[in-house]
Image (spheres, grey):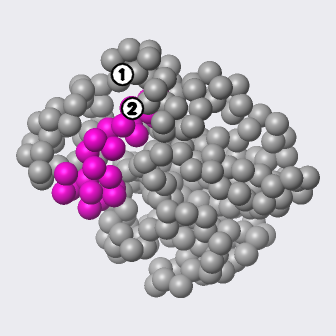
Amino acid sequence: MYSPVKDGIERSAKSVRFTEVKPPDTFQHIVHSYWELRTEAALSEDFHYQVIPDACVNILFNQTNLDIAAITAAPASAMVLNLGKDFHYVGIQLFPGAWRGHPSELCRKLVDQPYTGTLPLVVTNRRLASLSFQQQAPILTTLAEHLKMSGLIGKNPITSKILSHVFEIHKVSDMAKLTGLSTRQLQRSLKETTGFTPHDFLKIIRLQYSFGGDFLNHFADQSHFIHSFRRATGHTPEKYKKRFGV
């Protein structure tokens, strides 16, 4: 099962906590996790959060300003967000391709404006307020169930098949053959459901699996791996591990 690595939190950020729990089994292949990112005490300096490409969509709630929420997606290369000195976010991480809503709903930058869409995100954010993360999980499940029944999230058979057989894929033509699509059909499908071309999607998945140490299954050699890793994260694997502990 595809399990994206957590985004970069520097080792020195002792007062920043990331917590992740699995959703109910009814969301298999749709929701990867519920998560919380927060400061346990105000920081002396602004915190810079390194977002690693994973092709996932997140439903994000800002618990320090209950009007702020969004459907977010990261680009194909790492992005650094300045979260300030005091923050509290809660979210639902969807598997790649599980978001079926309109692409215009997706935000690919720092979310700092009130949500003005039609989904019940602000209402949900207010329900989450003042609860522990453990108490928030059932509320996140209620929202996920609503989105599933509305057809806005669901299992994507194309991306699910790719993620389940990623070790058999060495190039885009392998991906097309695996899914039973032509290269053109695959291009259109992935662009519509993930926002990425097949090449970029494969690059992101390979990067994610490389954090598990099996990079030789996805890259021609160590040099190719280091070059691709640096392009995606801005760091060599060694420097990234030293800085972020991943």
Circle 1 — which element?
loop
Circle 2 — which element?
helix
Residue at x 71%, y 31% (from the top left corner): 243
With respect to residue 60, does 168 lie above or below? above
Q: Residue 115, which numbered label?
A: none
Q: Closer to the camera: disc 1 or disc 2?
A: 1
The percent coordinates of residue 196 (x first, y second) are: 32, 52
For the stretch drawn in magenta, what is the main secondary structure?
helix
User: Callout 1: 10 Å neighbours few (<14), some, many (20+)?
Assistant: some
Residue at x 28%, y 41% (from the top left corner): 199
Q: In this rendered view, identify the residue nearer to me: 143 or 3.
A: 3
Q: Is residue 83 left or right of residue 186?
A: right
Mark 1, residue position: 219
Q: Check disc 1 and give the amino acid type.
A: Phe
Mark 2, residue position: 206
Point out the stretch of residues depicted in magenta. 187-210
